[in-house]
């Protein structure tokens, strides 16, 4: 069997996810069988890029505390407009190292509004 490219795997996976079919187990089994598990992180990133090209933005959101419903909605609306996305999927994480603000990562961008980032900007502008 010919080796499938990472982008081909990502495109198929993205299409299946959009169609409502989760083939994550099959993708993982293929990577194990073909001894390509070292590529898993790259394939996930490629899949997120493929989803973005199809109007679905996947974003990782880190915050110091659990997001309120209003904050979550505001982030989703911001990303929908900024990315031209039809659908937004958020993966949230509580990061105890953050004092305040949020950090939003998509497949190809990062928005960092954390207190640490703001203080670093302020410090850099004073120099």
Image (cartoon, rainbow, N blue to C red):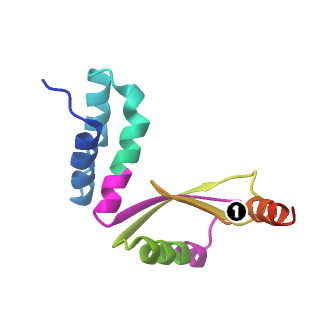
At a point 41% along the width and 27% down the height, the residue shown is 38
In the image: residue 1, left or right of residue 64 = left
Above or below, 28 relative to 94: above
Region of the chain picked out in magenta, as a range: 48-72
In the image: residue 109, left or right of residue 80 = right
In the image: residue 92, left or right of residue 54 = right
Magenta span has 59? Answer: yes
Magenta span has 50? Answer: yes
At a point 60% along the width and 75% down the height, the residue shown is 71
Q: Residue furthest front?
A: 127
Q: Write down the quadrant of residue 61 in the picture.
A: bottom right
Residue under numbered circle 1: 65
Above or below, 111 relative to 41: below
Task: Give coordinates of residue 41: x percent, y percent.
Answer: 43, 37
Depth order, front residue of 20/18: 18
Task: Give coordinates of residue 96: x percent, y percent.
Answer: 74, 52
């Amino acid at each position: 069997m010919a080796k499938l490219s990472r982008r081909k795997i990502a495109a198929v996976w993205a299409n299946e996810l959009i169609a409502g079919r989760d083939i994550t187990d099959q993708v993982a089994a293929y990577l194990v069988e073909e001894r390509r598990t070292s590529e898993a992180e790259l394939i996930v990133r490629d899949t997120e890029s493929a989803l973005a090209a199809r109007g679905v933005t996947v974003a990782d959101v880190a915050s110091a505390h659990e997001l309120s419903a209003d904050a979550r909605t505001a982030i989703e609306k911001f990303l929908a407009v900024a990315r031209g996305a039809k659908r937004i999927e958020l993966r949230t994480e509580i990061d105890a190292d953050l004092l305040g603000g949020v950090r939003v990562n998509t497949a190809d961008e990062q928005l960092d509004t954390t207190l640490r980032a703001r203080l670093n900007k302020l410090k850099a502008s004073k120099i």
